[in-house]
Amino acid sequence: FWKALREMEVNGVEFDGRTRAIVEKITTEGAGGKSWSDWDGDELVKLGRMRQMVGLDSAGKGSRSR
């Protein structure tokens, strides 16, 4: 999913509510049944970047929101 988001960003595709909903679901439910304590640092960094890219965190708001 991370690669798909990066490709969308590079190609100038705007993130919509569906994209933000997917990232929010990953954030709230985790991925692959892993608890947050099982995530490694790289995975958490990628999640933070995804949230910023789609405007779920303040650092990314405004740049991609509709």
Image (cartoon, rainbow, N blue to C red):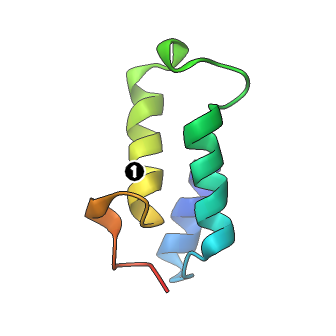
Q: What residue is at 58 percent from the left and 38 percent from the top?
A: 28
In the rendered structure, the answer to whether residue 24 lies left or right of residue 65 reads: right
Q: Residues within 10 Å of mark 1 (few under 14, many from 20)?
A: some
What's the amino acid at mark 1? Arg
Question: Furthest-right residue in view?
Answer: 32
Kindly give the residue lying farthest to the left in the view shown. Answer: 59
Counting labels gives: 1
Give the side of residue 3 with respect to residue 58, left or right.
Answer: right
Q: Camera-side residue: 3 or 54? A: 54
Give the structural element (helix, strand or loop) at label 1. helix
Residue furthest bottom in the image: 66
Q: Is residue 32 above or below residue 65?
A: above
Residue 8 picture location, percent across and down = 58, 72
Residue occupying image coordinates x 57% and y 67%: 7
The answer to whether residue 1 is above or below residue 38 is below
Q: Left or right of 49: which side holds 38? A: right
- Residue at 45% x, 19% y: name it: 40
| Viewer-side residue, 44 vs 58 | 58
Of 37 and 14, nearer the camera is 37
Please name the residue shown 58% across and 63% down the image. 20
Provide the residue designation for mark 1.
49
Above or below, 61 against 31 in this view is below
Percent x, y of residue 66: 49, 86
| Residue found at the very far top of the displayed protein | 38
How far across and how far down the image is residue 12, in percent?
A: 50, 83
Judge whether 65 appears above or below 22 on screen: below
- Quadrant assignment, res 58: bottom left
Could you tell me residue 45's position as x and y percent? 38, 37
